[in-house]
Image (cartoon, coloured by chain):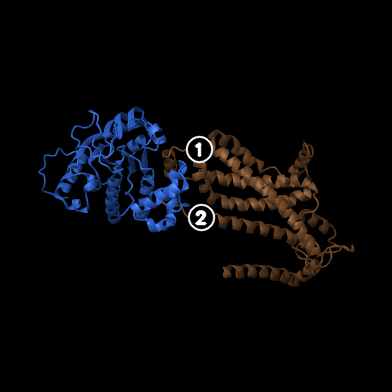
Chain colours: A brown, B blue
Amino acid sequence: MRRQVLLGVAGVVALGLAWEGYKLLAPDDGVVVGELTVLPRTTDLAMPHLWDMAARALEPVNSATDALPLWVAVLVAAAFTLGVAAVGWVVGVVVGLATATVMQRFRTAESALLPWVVLSQTVPLIALAPLVRRWGSQLEIGAFDWQDWMSVAVIAAYLAFFPVSIGALRGLSSPDAVHLDLMRSYGVGWWRTYRSLRLPATVPHLIPALRLAAANAVIGTVVAEVSIGLRGGIGRMIVEFGASASADPAKQWSPIFGAVLVGLVAAGVCVLIARALARYRVSEVS
Amino acid sequence: MNTPAPTRPTAPSAGPADAPAATGTEAHAAPAVEVRGVTRRFSSRSGEVVALSDVDLTVRAGEFVSLIGPSGCGKSTLLRLIADLDEPTAGELAVFGRPPRVARQNHDFGIAFQQAGLLPWRSVRTNVELPLELHGAGRAARRARATELLEMVGLADFAQHLPHQLSGGMQQRVAIARALAERPSLLLMDEPFGALDEMTREHVQTELLRLRAETGAAVVFVTHSIPEAVYLSDRVVVMSARPGQVREVVPVGLGAARDRSDDVREDDAFFDRVRAVREALHGTDGTTPRGVDRR
């Protein structure tokens, strides 16, 4: 455990040293072969010093009198993005599990659905985002009003459901013949077999799928925020600060670190889930 | 449960004539298992395989019957047909006078396979409780029964362990406890000790005899091992392969199987029966002098 922490810290330090080392040693215009730049420029504009990034994070976001410190603004945006990604993740996991269950239950459903599930992931996200937004805005159910953040969550869910449905389908089909025979000999129906045998047996296949789904949900949220133009999240912040990079090059790195943080928290939650389900992950016995 | 039944189960006249008197303690009007003219064919790409051909067999209530034969003789298929895990192509089966499907839904039998088949995420205790839980028994009742069964198979101290923390023999004992959970009058066992080493095997065999004596259940036991079949059974059904048929039924006659102990394994009568089964299995006509060779 302690060794793991040390290794993790060492990795981060090594990355920082590589950044500063390259900046120190490489020429300002980057490494150019013929006409081609093969390694990036090292000017303060392109590669600010790490300490400049840190110092900028402590200063206010802008010159307004009530401006928050940059790092606080980034944390608020990161929390917003994380929330939207979490909603997308949960929806994606539920839909993925449901899809897998239907496919496991009905052979024909598997042949009918699986190609579409795979095909769904080939649609480019950028093309999808405006479509989802337009469809959503036409939705009106009583007092319910479709919000832009819901469109973003839908896109996150769309990316998250795929690994879950594939992983869960494998898991639901994984019980041994002897266990299925046993359930049959007990004369219990599909639902009981599903709850007592298939679902628990799915866990070892589901954990890596949940991790992939979390990564997909975060990426989907950040990208969809940009392409839908949703304010308040880390994706929009990266684009906004990037626009002013020539004047304030260190500023845009804060939301980038914020996005990394969102990914880390999502991965951490998955570790906790895996730990809670550890009992279901013991190696199969005879 | 163990009160001797004054009325012996009335075996149907169709039962094998050379069978010893039934030793059942449960007064079931119908035999535990009745198989009449059962045939099972499997069709595959390479043609049709006849796994069982016109098999007749009767197992009385409380009787221990082993099925033995070369691989491919359909002994496991026959067990699966009795358990309603498969259906015959022709012929009829009855379990306590009812179709196997009804018997299965009534939880009339317990079953154990070569693999212990414990659910790896459940503790030993909750594995034993599984059938009770699935059939809606209350928590307290489940707990009490599991405690009783685990004591019976000598694993009370391991109730909270997970299956992978147990040896193969212990896992198999848990599986047997699970099969006995609902006090079935019939136990179906498909080579349950096949994967165990010889020492463990003899130990669990004796334990099975004791458990069966305590419960009075009839047992249909599929095995590869001749000594195992003889040691455990009231009758040994010897089968032949391609097509799977009953070649001979060998009565063991070592006294009631339930009263046997490990000493029986050293007994002359035991070796005599082992030889009888082997001869039936290998198709010798039994004219070789008896009592000379002891394997």
Q: Quadrant of residue A43?
A: bottom right
A195 relative position to A229: left or right: left
Residue type indicated by callout 1? Trp
Which x, y percent locates residue A61? 84, 63
Tags 2 and 1 in contact by the CB under 8 Å rule? no
Residue B46 visible? The answer is no
Position of B64 relative to A203 (above/below): above
User: Looking at this view, is A14 or A283 the one in front?
Assistant: A283
Q: Quadrant of residue B170?
A: bottom left
Q: Which residue is mark 1?
A: A190
Q: Quadrant of residue B25?
A: top left
Mark 2: few, some, or many residues within 10 Å (few <14, many ≥20)?
A: some
> Quadrant where the N terminus of chain B lies?
top left
Which x, y percent locates residue A23? 75, 70
Q: Judge if badges 2 and 1 mark residues of a common chain.
A: yes
Q: What chain does badge 2 belong to?
A: A
Q: Which residue is mark 2?
A: A279
Q: Residue at x 67, y 68 (%)?
A: A12
Q: Secondary structure at mark 1?
A: helix
Q: Residue at x 37, y 51 (%)?
A: B148
Residue B9 visible? The answer is yes
Q: Which mark is residue B211?
A: none
Q: What chain does badge 1 belong to?
A: A
Mark 2 or mark 1: whose residue is earlier in sequence: 1
A10 relative position to B14: left or right: right
Marks 2/1: CA–CA distance: 23 Å
Q: Secondary structure at mark 2?
A: helix
Mark 1: few, some, or many residues within 10 Å (few <14, many ≥20)?
A: few
Which x, y percent locates residue B294? 15, 50
Which x, y percent locates residue A219? 70, 52
Residue type indicated by callout 2? Arg
A263 relative position to B265: left or right: right
